[in-house]
Image (spheres, rainbow, N blue to C red):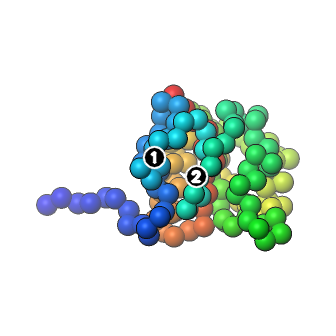
Amino acid sequence: MAVDLTPRLATGRTLIESYGKGGFRIAGQRYENSVLVLPTEVHAWPVAAIADITAQSLAPLLGQGGGRAPVEILLLGCGARFAMIPAALRAELRAMGLRCDAMDTGAACRTYNVLLAEDRRVAAALIAID
């Protein structure tokens, strides 16, 4: 008997299917370089390292409602290895209503898919890896 491990998602959800070779395959489409992934959309993200991240670079995660984020959890894929988020950036994100969890990009992709399947308000900021 075969067991289907594919999460059941509502139509239009942005499941991360693969990562590596400098990009991602998300909801059937290939994206080169780093990306911001929300439950229903993907944005190019001009970041190649933790040092490049600013609150402004994460602006697509912010909703129209007074600068508060439409997501509750931001998963930060730091690249091939975990890296610490600078304290000042973490405080800025917290002020915008984002709880940020940093991990390597592979772990961030897997965690995003699990939380998306649980219908959580999650986003992922993913630094591409080769």
Give the number of callouts.
2
Return the x and y of residue 12 as percentages of the image width and height: 47, 64
Mark 2 in CB contact with mark 1 (< 8 angstroms): yes
Q: Quadrant of the N terminus?
A: bottom left
Q: Is residue 14 left or right of residue 58?
A: left
Q: For the point 48% across and 34% down, which residue is it?
A: 20
Q: For the point 51% across and 54% down, which residue is it?
A: 111
Task: Mark yes or no: residue 104 visible.
Answer: no
Return the x and y of residue 72 as percentages of the image width and height: 67, 66
Q: Is residue 80 left or right of residue 12?
A: right
Residue linked to disc 2: 42
Return the x and y of residue 94 as percentages of the image width and height: 79, 59
Q: For the point 69% across and 38% down, which residue is it?
A: 46
**Residue 52 appears in which quarter of the rendering?**
top right
Between 33 and 107, the one lying in front of the other is 33
Asked which secondary structure carries label 1, the reply is strand
Q: Amino acid at mark 1?
A: Gln
Instruction: Check the image and report above or below for 111 versus 121.
Output: above
Residue linked to disc 1: 29
